[in-house]
Amino acid sequence: MADIDLDHLQRLAALRLNEAEAERAYRELEGIIHMIDAMRGIDTEGVAPMANPLDAVQRLRPDVVTENIDREAYQAVAPNVDGGFYLVPRVVE
Amino acid sequence: MSVRDISQALAAGSYSSVEITRRYLQTAESRNDAINGYISITPEVALAQAEAADARRGRGEATPLTGVPMAHKDIFCTRGVRTTCGSRMLANFVSPYDATVVEQLAHAGAVMLGKTNMDEFAMGSSNENSSFGAVSNPWDTGRVPGGSSGGSAAVVAAGMAPFATGTDTGGSIRQPAAFCGVSGLKPTYGRVSRYGMIAFASSLDQGGPMARTVADLALPFAYMAGFDARDSTSAQRSEPWLEAMRQGEVPQQSNGLRIGLPAEYMAKAGDSGAALEAAIKALEALGHSIRPVHLPHTEAAVPAYYVVAGAEASTNLSRYDGVRFGHRAEHPTDLTDLYERSRTEGFGAEVKRRILTGTYVLSVGYYDAYYRQAQKVRRLIQQDFLQAFTDVDVLLTPTTPNVAFAKAALTQDPVAMYAQDVFTTPASLAGLPALSLPCGFLDGLPLGMQLIAPHFEEQRLLALGAQYQEATDWHTRTPEFAP
């Protein structure tokens, strides 16, 4: 059976499930991992992993300014800003 | 009404864009209570765009899409109009910019009626994962429309828009198209810009059009497609046929094609088996030859897909932190609390499930066994297709293993829900273009068939699909939908 440390996964994913949700998530994750285990036995010796279906790589563009950031417009959707800064709970005491 | 009929009527001056837009707005508003296909209906935007379209036509500057009403899946960012992605996380998000797809269709003069409902962050095969309520299938409102572009499929089927945009990561255009009896094209990966299309799994996501008929897909597709410097995976291609399609041309099928029938799919055709046999006969009668092919790694597609898509989703969705945009938890005690509660409150159950799956397959000790292995299997699946295409021009398969299922039938069993994607995920992993179109009915519910072509051969799919629809009438049936 799959070895799932749900507390660890939640920390990595920045999620916090309550007890009932966690119990259900654990069970469902077990089922999903069991399902995806079906591809583990396939012989992939010597096969190169495919990250992009066209095997394309990132394009480079000339290093010139193409657009100016409109900070006010972009921060208009932020939940909490002040003077151009995003506000978060105090990190450094 | 078809996109082509509206386009021609507008050109002939039979009615104005404002008139046809008002009619569609009325239908959309009166039917939305029953269908819930729209998250937002935007009459002010629509009528302003329709007036502009009529003025543009008056100046002699119209394209064949100018003044034609349509709907955008609510995954495409629209400046000034709320973009929710079906999520509580973005319930109040108003994008400061337009997606390239939105911009291109607006440039062509298309008129946006509203934004369509969808599974949250495009994760789902039933549209039951939307934070804005489930969408009903217009053929039977007790059933699901498919997902994740279920709203787009439903509004097209219910006559609430002549065409709509959708996105497809593992089948999210094709499966709802099949369930709702409409046509839907997932283009080649890289063909349609992903800029401003909210990311789910970036190596798979692809936008495409949905409409009643294949002929009606050509025009929107041609305006959605094209290189975009703002999308780092956009394909740099120059296809003269795309320009011809932008002028209103529908590709014609002139010669007989070799159509491959993958044995691995046919063995699981289920509900679609008999309809597919009839479609084969119709295609043979049109001069095409059918031959069996093998795609031996087909069974590995759903597992590999849920690893790759989960991994990419967990990475992409890490941007929702309650800081820059989206839902923010109230009164956080510290930064970790802000992150965890914002995300826990903002995301629904399926999104959390995918994030946790993705986090698992990417975590230390599991990366090679799952993520890397899935990427290798992905190549084997693509090689199966490329091998098949040395012998055939196009592949024919069922789109789904069954007709639209009842609401709530699969919500307690994620693995059974994922199995719905058995015929659609392989082409997604391989980055191939694929078209779903109606091919029959079972107990009054539509069935779809899928055509898959080599990379960048959308023209072949559209030509063959349009030819099939000239010889058959499944696509002309509409639900007896009582408004």
Image: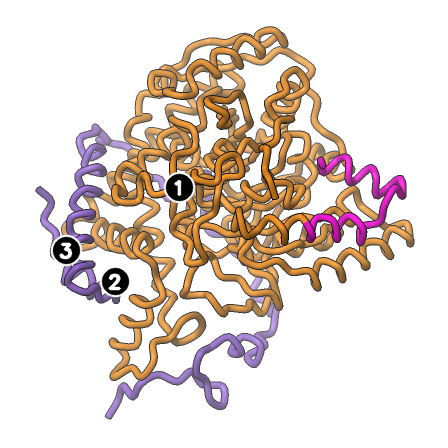
Chain colours: A purple, B orange
Q: Three-letter amino acid code at disc 2?
A: Ala
Residue A29 left/right relative to A67: left
x 91%, y 54%: residue: B59
Residue segment shown in magenta: B1-26
For the residues carrying marks 2 and 1, which lies nearer the camera in this image?
Answer: 1
- Left or right: where A71 falls relative to B296: right
Q: Could you say which quadrant of the image residue B230 lies in?
A: bottom right
Disc 1: host chain: B
Please name the residue shown 89% across and 39% down the image: B12
**SS of the residue under disc 1:** loop
Q: Position of residue B236 (x, y in %)?
A: 59, 44
- Label the magenta part by its dominant secondary structure: helix
Q: Residues within 10 Å of mark 1 (few under 14, many from 20)?
A: many
Q: Disc 2 marks which residue?
A: A13
10 Å crowding of disc 3: few (<14), some (14-19), many (20+): few
Which residue sits at x=45%, y=21%?
B397
Residue B48 figure quarter: bottom right
Three-letter residue code for mark 3: Glu
Image coordinates for residue A19, horizontal then vertical, percent: 15, 63
Q: Do the residues at discs 2 and 1 belong to one chain?
A: no
